[in-house]
Image (cartoon, grey):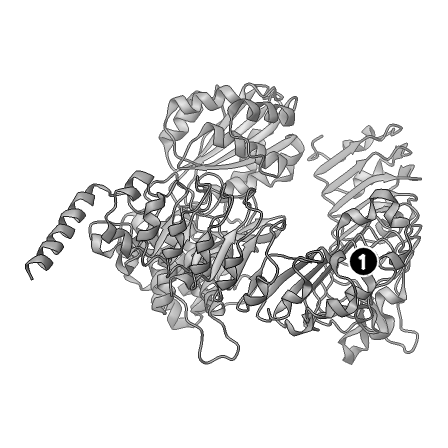
């Protein structure tokens, strides 16, 4: 007994030694556990369906100040200051997306600074915002040179969002760097900050100062508008009693948009009068401090989560850095690794990830997550700073805490210094369930992680993993993305419980060891498309749900038959190097029809086959593409189909059946199918929303087969109305060099008196690189955006523009035969706000009354039209237009 007591005392002494390590769990605000870049990763796009209330006049005032034509200073700064939750970032987004900003400034740049004010990082993200890709540059001199290339002689506006730094020397350093960019006078910086001191320091550092904006609270009516919008009552009639309760709740929001937004999320799920009344009468409204009030409102949203596991999932997000951006599936996999999810016993075919998806949706609906959009699509999710603060607070009671006062409860740590990790006791290390680190992890410590479930080394400064790596028997989630690791140790095959393995953007890691075939519980595998796998390895991983790519090897490589047993695959599957499949019989070995949960399927042949040494002119018998694709028939519930660099003369029978049996398709992408002359019948598909046709050089006609006259979707049988392409929203036809005719759909069916409606939902049309096309349909009742370029005739453009009345944006480039832009082309488009005319060499005239027809035009760009005359006299009809 004495030696046991001594051992306990020794452990207590060891714990006492660690008392100084109060930052054990991610208290460093400059860490980046979830992804590349600095703390803050906000973007300039709005959330889906997001609207701005109560700030319209403020936006106009800022825009007017920024675009003042008399302002000739090299650089000016405007500060937006306000307490948390007032909507500083939302206001900056509104200004950033104003058409007048696009017109006045040559370049727009969005950088979120957050807690770490690193000048080189800011410069890097400025360059990334301008070029739309990560250059990887870190040294200041090449960064400045690259920014010069982008900004010399140009006027730019730079948003620095969520700034905290009061270090005057760093502001002076940033000003010095910006002064070297040779930009045009009149460039401006907007900063958003909670601190008036930060604003003053920035204003002092930048010589020219625009009026500071102290953001105020909203009115009760504006808060009520936010509540209704978030609760999905914006367009509904609300009875007088519920209106009274709703406005009472709005009044108690204290004018804080974030409070209204969060409460609206609660009201969305609590729809009865009594539910709303309980929110109104909550005790949270008695606290005087505004920030405490916000936190307690957020806490109310947390308390509204009924399931304890759901609350634990929310609390686990405290381990991610503030303003993290993370993919939905990634976070679900982290929850799964910690055992926070359980499959439902009440639902057939319900998997553990489905539980995570339900949890995520609940948190999103309660405004505890925010959507991050890119290119109009939701790509990732984040948390508001205050919501993250809430996650930190509630995690203390869930043993998912950053508070080390109770050392025995520590289970999860994130981004602690290497020295702290190395000095932790074996007892403490042995208890850890999660470790997020972007630093060097001592090799010796891997053998001590006896209970570790999650290990994220994303962006860690490591090049190899210790062989003791295999001792982490409980590990379920491993992320080594964005590292310099060159090889995986063979001991990785001992991680039998591993569920998720992420190794993306690992430039030096080109292959994996054969021992990986022992990872029989692996469900999600992410890697770069150049990764090589030993033959036979994937065949044994029958539990896989996610597979980034499947690269078909050559004769002695990974054959297509390795897919045969992977029937749990779901989501997206990209099959590459299909030229390595010999024939239809070999292709059938994949048994794609059995993979019912693969909803997005891409078939990719090597692009190089159609370019060098005249391969494109070789007879089709030299290629096996038709037979191969015939054998790769998918299941009929497929939602997205993409075919790239296919060299067959015609598509396989399962694509050309009449009607096409893939009735659930939502997206069809056909890239570089150079030999095909015909398209699948698509017009009858009820859910098809996006079609992209590119590089089909032998396509000559878009007609009845494309529309599917005899197999249309009957949207309203009672009225005998038949609809062609009933759900299509975007259509792109590009690089079809032989396309000569795009037929108009009939207005009535030949076999009956039924009325035909075509493209009722089409909003975006791109038509380019079709020099032989001489006609196009004119019936596009909902078209908003039209891009048309590199055409041998103006007739297709005229056909569309003369009849369409809904355009808001028109882009025209290199249209032969277009000599004049008449009012007839645009007279019906009263809502046109953007017009771009580029490199139309034959254009000599724009009718003055064109601009009279377009009273709402806010953006006009004309360039490369060498013969253009008689434009100026029409410009005075557009007082709001800025050149």
What count of labels does the image hold? 1
Residue farthest to the front? Answer: 556
- The reply to whether residue 219 is visible in this rendering is yes
Q: Secondary structure at mark 1?
A: loop
Q: Depth check: give the residue in front, 272 or 738.
A: 738
**Which quadrant holds residue 730?**
bottom right
**Which quadrant holds residue 44?**
top right
x, y percent for residue 653: 83, 70
x, y percent for residue 544: 54, 65
Q: Depth check: give the residue in front, 196 or 178.
A: 178
Q: Residue at x 61, y 22 (%)?
A: 183
Q: Is residue 369 above or below residue 661?
A: above
Q: Is residue 658 left or right of residue 335?
A: right
Q: Depth check: give the residue in front, 317 or 490.
A: 490
Instruction: Report the quarter where the N terminus lies.
Output: bottom left
**Which quadrant holds residue 883?**
top right
Label 1 crowd bin: few (<14), some (14–19), many (20+), radius 10 Å? many
- The reply to whether residue 692 is visible in this rendering is no
x, y percent for residue 144: 56, 23
Q: Is residue 400 left or right of residue 833?
A: left
Q: Is residue 644 above or below residue 217?
A: below
Q: Is residue 463 left or right of residue 560?
A: left
x, y percent for residue 362: 45, 65
Q: Which residue is mark 1?
A: 780
């Amino acid at each position: 007994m004495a030696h046991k007591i001594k051992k306990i005392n020794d452990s207590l002494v060891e714990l006492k030694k660690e008392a100084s390590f109060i930052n054990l769990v991610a208290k460093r605000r400059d860490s980046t556990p979830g992804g590349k870049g600095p703390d803050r990763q906000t973007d300039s796009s709005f959330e889906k369906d997001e609207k701005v209330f109560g700030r319209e006049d403020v936006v106009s005032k800022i825009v007017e100040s920024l675009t003042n034509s008399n302002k000739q200073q090299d650089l000016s700064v405007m500060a937006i200051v306000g307490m948390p939750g007032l909507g500083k970032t939302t206001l900056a987004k509104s200004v950033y997306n104003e058409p007048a900003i696009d017109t006045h400034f040559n370049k727009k740049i969005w950088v979120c600074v957050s807690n770490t004010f690193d000048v080189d990082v800011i410069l890097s993200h400025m360059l990334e915002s301008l070029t739309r890709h990560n250059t990887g540059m870190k040294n200041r001199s090449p960064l400045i040179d690259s920014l010069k290339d982008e900004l010399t002689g140009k006027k730019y506006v730079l948003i620095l969002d969520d700034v905290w730094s009061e270090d005057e020397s760093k502001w002076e350093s940033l000003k010095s760097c910006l002064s070297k960019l040779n930009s045009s006078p009149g460039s401006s910086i907007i900063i958003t900050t909670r601190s008036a001191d930060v604003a003053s320091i920035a204003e002092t550092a930048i010589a020219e100062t625009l009026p500071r904006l102290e953001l105020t609270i909203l009115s009760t009516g504006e808060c009520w508008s936010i509540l209704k919008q978030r609760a999905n009552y914006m367009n509904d009639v609300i009875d007088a009693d519920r209106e009274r309760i709703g406005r009472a709740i709005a009044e108690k929001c204290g004018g804080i948009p974030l409070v209204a937004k969060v409460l609206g999320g609660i009201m969305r799920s609590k729809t009865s009068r009594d539910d709303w009344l309980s929110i109104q009468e909550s005790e949270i409204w008695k606290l005087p401090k505004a920030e405490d009030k916000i936190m307690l409102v957020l806490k109310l949203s947390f308390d509204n989560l009924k399931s304890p596991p759901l609350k634990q999932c929310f609390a686990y997000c405290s381990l991610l850095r503030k303003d993290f951006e993370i993919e939905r599936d990634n976070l679900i996999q982290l929850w799964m690794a910690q055992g926070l999810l359980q499959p439902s016993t009440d639902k057939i075919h319900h998997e553990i990830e489905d539980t995570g998806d339900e949890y995520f949706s609940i948190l999103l609906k309660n405004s505890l997550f925010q959507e991050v959009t890119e290119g109009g699509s939701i790509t990732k999710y984040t948390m508001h700073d205050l919501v993250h603060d809430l996650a930190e607070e509630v995690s203390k009671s869930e043993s998912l805490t950053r508070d080390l006062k109770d050392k025995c409860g520590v289970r999860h740590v994130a981004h602690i210094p290497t020295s702290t990790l190395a000095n932790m006791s074996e007892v403490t290390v042995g208890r850890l369930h999660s470790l997020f680190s972007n630093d060097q992890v001592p090799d010796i410590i891997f053998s001590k992680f006896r209970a570790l479930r999650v290990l994220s080394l994303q962006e860690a400064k490591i090049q190899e993993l210790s062989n003791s790596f295999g001792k982490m028997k409980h590990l379920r989630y491993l992320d080594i993305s964005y590292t310099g690791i060159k090889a995986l140790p063979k001991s990785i095959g001992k991680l039998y419980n591993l569920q998720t393995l992420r190794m993306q953007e690992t430039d030096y890691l080109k292959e994996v060891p054969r021992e990986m075939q022992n990872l029989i519980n692996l469900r999600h595998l992410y890697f770069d498309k150049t990764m090589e796998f030993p033959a036979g390895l994937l065949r044994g991983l029958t539990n896989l749900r996610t597979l980034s790519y499947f690269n078909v090897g050559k004769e002695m490589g990974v054959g297509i038959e390795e897919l045969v047993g992977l029937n749990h695959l779901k989501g997206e599957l990209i099959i590459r190097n299909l030229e390595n499949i010999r024939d239809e019989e070999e292709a059938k070995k994949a048994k794609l029809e059995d993979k019912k949960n693969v909803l997005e399927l891409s078939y990719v042949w090597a692009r190089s086959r159609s370019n060098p040494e005249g391969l494109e002119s070789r007879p089709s018998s030299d290629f096996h593409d038709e037979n191969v694709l015939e054998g790769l028939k998918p299941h009929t519930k497929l939602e997205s189909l993409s075919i790239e660099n296919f060299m067959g003369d015609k598509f396989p029978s399962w694509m050309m059946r009449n009607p096409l049996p893939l009735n659930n398709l939502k997206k069809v992408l056909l890239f570089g199918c150079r030999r095909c002359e015909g398209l699948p019948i698509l017009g009858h598909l009820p859910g098809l929303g996006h079609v992209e046709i590119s590089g089909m050089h032998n396509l000559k006609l878009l007609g009845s087969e494309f529309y599917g006259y005899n197999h249309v979707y009957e949207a309203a049988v009672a009225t005998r109305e038949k609809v062609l392409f009933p759900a299509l929203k975007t259509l792109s036809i590009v690089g079809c060099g032989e396309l000569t005719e795009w037929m108009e759909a009939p207005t009535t069916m030949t076999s009956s008196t039924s009325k035909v409606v075509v493209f009722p939902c089409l909003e975006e049309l791109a038509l380019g690189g079709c020099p032989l096309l001489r006609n196009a349909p004119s019936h596009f009742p909902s078209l908003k955006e039209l891009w048309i370029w590199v055409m041998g005739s103006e007739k297709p453009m005229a056909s569309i523009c003369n009849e369409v009345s809904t355009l808001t944006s028109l882009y025209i480039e290199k249209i032969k035969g277009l000599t004049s832009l008449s009012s007839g082309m645009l007279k019906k488009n009263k809502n046109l706000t953007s017009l771009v005319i580029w490199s139309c060499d034959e254009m000599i005239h724009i009718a003055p009354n064109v601009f009279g027809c377009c009273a709402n035009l806010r953006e006009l760009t004309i360039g490369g039209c060498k013969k253009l005359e008689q434009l100026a006299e029409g410009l005075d009809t557009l007082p709001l237009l800025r050149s």
